[in-house]
Image (spheres, rainbow, N blue to C red):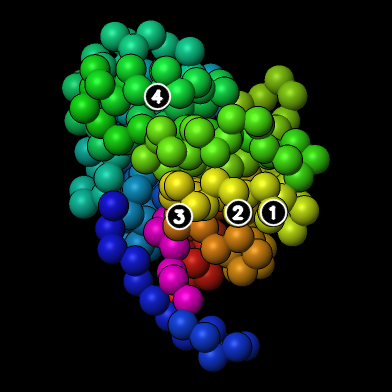
Amino acid sequence: MCPARWRHSRSSHAVVAVPELKICGLTREVDAAAAVACGAGYVGVIFAGGPRERSVAQARRVLDAAAGARRVAVVAEQSVEELAALAEALALDVLQLHGDPTIARIASVRRLTGRAVWAVVRVAEGALRADAVDLSSAADMVVVEPLVPGRLGGTGTSFDWAAARESIASIRRPGRLALAGGLTPINVKEAIAALAPDLVDVSSGVESAPGIKDGQRMRDFAEAVLR
């Protein structure tokens, strides 16, 4: 992970950590290059279904256009062997496990791939799944996003950050926190103030259409997060 950066809060004069930025759901090389130019330290491609999913060859071209950023693949039900092959083919830095991963799956993926493993944990009515603290200890990062029945991410739906604060605080003690789901250039500062994540993860919130990133929205989002 990159070392934390710090900034002064204009409202309280306190010194606060600046979260890292991941732009996910990239489908075009031009958008990947623009993501890096605006300050994204991580870029993500999708192998978990939906309109942003790409083939290995397409994903490789996208990631190769994001020189200098760490490479993340969002995956779901693939076997550990398939994930190891994907990690090698794309020179991945991180495998982000969707589909309610277990502690055993996290350990198996890390052991066979040698990559960092992030676990997606979904929020429902302000609460996390019962084993969220254990998952936070097992994974290199927990990515918290809303539970949308029948969908795995990229929905543009946020959750009540204040209502989830207590549940999320429990996973902050053992591990690192990424925040995803419904983030936009307009609301991301509020989300950061509420939960103080180590990383913010955006996809649909900087798009003009599914999978098509908007350059100005990416710049505005990065400005809100990093400046």
Q: Residues within 10 Å of mark 1 (few under 14, many from 20)?
A: some
3 or 2: mark nearer the eye: 2
The amino acid marked with disc number 3 is Leu
Tell me where residue 131 appears, x and y as whole percent: 59, 30
Q: Which sits in the foreground, 30 or 83? A: 83
Real-space CA distance between mark 3 and mark 1, rounded to the nearest whole angstrom:
18 Å
Contact flag, marks 2 and 1 (Cβ < 8 Å):
yes
Residue depicted at x 49% and y 52%: 173
Residue 17 is one of the magenta-drawn residues: yes
**Residue to which mark 2 is pinned:** 169
Query: Which of the two discs, 3 and 1, labels the residue nearer the N terminus?
Result: 1
**For marks 4 and 2 on the same chain, the one whose residue lies earlier in the sequence:** 4
Vertical relation: 117 (above or below) 156: above
Taking the spot 49% from the left edge, 67% from the top edge, the residue there is 225
Does residue 157 appear left or right of residue 54 in this picture?
A: right
Residue 51 coordinates in the image, percent (x, y): 56, 26
| Gap between marks 4 and 2 measured at Cα | 21 Å
Residue segment shown in magenta: 16-21
Residue at x 37%, y 63% (from the top left corner): 38
Amino acid type of the residue tagged 4 in the rendering = Ile
First along the sequence among labels 3 and 2: 2
Q: Secondary structure at mark 4?
A: helix
Residues under numbered marks 3 and 2 in contact, where contact means CB atoms less than 8 Å apart: no
Left or right: residue 82 versus residue 46 is left
Q: Amino acid at mark 2?
A: Ala
Q: CA distance from mark 2 to mark 1?
A: 5 Å
